[in-house]
Image (cartoon, grey):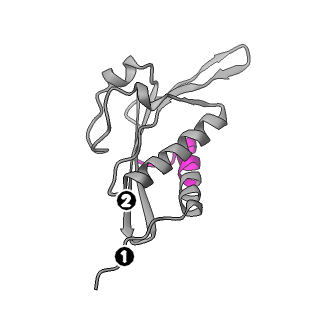
Amino acid sequence: MTLPKMSPTRRQVLSLAGSLSAAVAMGIAGRPAFAQLTGKQTQGTIAPIPIAIPEFVGDDPKLGAEVADVISADLGNSGLFQPLDRRSFLEKVRDVNAAPNFTNWRSIHADALLAAMATHDVPGVERTDVVTRTH
């Protein structure tokens, strides 16, 4: 018997994305960064860090796009990050375990890159694996 593939509800996507955003912002998600992320402080204000957040890879492109959109909005609304427009990206992340070509990301002025994978392990239940790469 084959179980039908169930799409996640908006509430599930938002809940997952909110949790993931908090974990990423607090620096406890994923693997350790390969470089230290720094911000600029000028006259008592912190300049938002330009961050590239491509659509997450995985077996469900819609889920990957939705979770990436929510995380991008959450990080942007924090005031600490400035998510870059995906239309400016020179490449797509296809494998979160492969080292990204930071030259391409730096050329669009990204100081950070959040690459992640969102997958369905059980129908109707999402699992999001996160690999963060910063430069």
Q: Residue at x 51, y 48 (%)?
A: 28
- Pick the front one: 8 or 48: 8
- Residue 37: horizontal and vertical position, in percent? 49, 28
Is 46 located above or below residue 53 in the figure?
above
- Residue 126: horizontal and vertical position, in percent? 44, 64
**Residue at mark 2:** 119
Question: Is any atom of residue 125 visible in this view?
Answer: yes
First to last magenta residue range: 19-30
Report the disc number at residue 49: none
Looking at the rendered structure, the kind of residue marked 2 is: Thr
Q: Residue furthest right?
A: 44
Q: Quadrant of residue 86?
A: top left
Determine the CA span between mark 1 and mark 2.
16 Å
Q: Secondary structure at mark 2?
A: strand
Q: Quadrant of the N terminus?
A: bottom left
Q: Residue furthest top?
A: 43
**Residue at mark 1:** 4
Q: Residue at x 73, y 18 (%)?
A: 44
Rate crowding at label 2 as few (under 14), some (14 to 19) or many (20 or more) other CA atoms within 10 Å: some
Q: Residue at x 39, y 20 (%)?
A: 106
